[in-house]
Amino acid sequence: MIPLLSANLFRLRRDPLLWLALGMCLAGSAAFSASFRDTPSFDDVYFFPFCVALCAFLSLFLGREYGDGTLRNKVAAGFRRWEIYLAYFLTALVVDLCLLAAFLLPFALANGPALAGLAGERLALVLLGVVLLTVAMTALLTAVSCCVSHWAVGVMVNLGLWFFLMFGAYQIEFALGQPAYVTELYTDAQGRVQEGETTPNPHYLGGTLRVVAEGVDACLPHGQLNTYVSYLTHYFYVQSEGLDPAETGWEDESFLTRSPLCALAVTAGVTGVGLVVFRKKDLK
């Protein structure tokens, strides 16, 4: 597998699309830094350049192996399919870490004093979680790119899959945010708004359905990203108000240790499924 990985990395270094993707991430980081200086809050919209660059580049880089016959040549040369797949996945991880560094490091350098206020352990857990959720996304993109023969189809599938998972995470979190009870409001004869009867909310998720929705949200990369973004936004808002974040923090910070484990589980599961499909795929 080492020769395969070395060949992939050599080809990666000479690929102009990688530098274009890095430029997209640097531009996204600059916009993120400028926004953060005006308002110390996080927004997942600034992660879009990184996500789009990762989806498009991996689809193009890995998908072209089908078109130029490189994949068939590797199999004919005696390399086993699991070696080829894992070499692609490790190459994709290198791309992921390079793009993530291009996105996060300029932001961290420009806003170091503000980030210094975040407790070292919490900052390390957040950074670890963000890295691992991108690794899980990379595993998913690699599986699609290795199992779709045409690079153009792979680009569309990966971008569509990312948008689907993103909006899916939004919908799940919206459903989980519904209150168990709602209070009816009405206007009295004097035009004043009054509270009426409190009734159960028909849109509230409870019981087994809520447990399942929480589990799915915890495993979705964008669901994890939304949690980290909300957590950091809350932290810096509290800090900007002159309050002690340690005293007004989130009641439950268990997600800081749970989310990385979920990301690792998703990475292992997706890689396993992708490898099984790739081993059975007809490369002709």
Image (cartoon, rainbow, N blue to C red):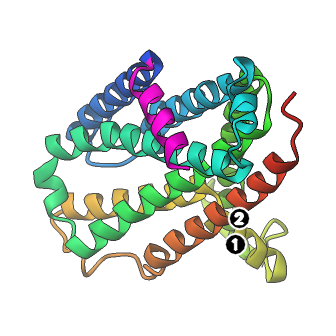
177 vs 47: above or below: below
* Residue found 65% across the figure and 45% down from its top: 84
Q: Position of residue 142 (x, y in %)?
A: 65, 43
* Element on which disc 1 rests: helix
Which residues, given as a range, are shown in magenta?
Answer: 1-15
> Does the image show residue 55?
yes
Residue at screen point 66% across, 40% down: 162
Residue 269: give its label: 2
Residue found at x 73% / y 76%: 181
Prevailing secondary structure class for the magenta stretch in the rendered image: helix
Residue 79 place in picture, x, y as percent = 68, 45
Q: Nearer the viewer, residue 41 or 187?
A: 41
Q: Is residue 196 visible?
A: no
Q: Return the residue nearer the eye: 247 or 72.
A: 72
Which residue is at the far front? 77
Identified by mark 1, the residue type is: Gly
Q: Residue at 38% across / 64% down in the picture?
A: 128
Q: Is residue 152 above or below residue 82?
A: above
Q: Amino acid at mark 2?
A: Gly
Left/right placement of residue 60 relative to residue 106 reads: right
Q: Which residue is mark 1?
A: 215
Crowding at dot 2, Cα within 10 Å, few <14 / some 14-19 / many 20+, comes out as: some
| Residue 23: x %, y % from top left | 35, 22
Question: In which quadrant of the rendered view does residue 224 lie?
Answer: bottom right
Residue 111 higher or lower than 264, as above or below: above
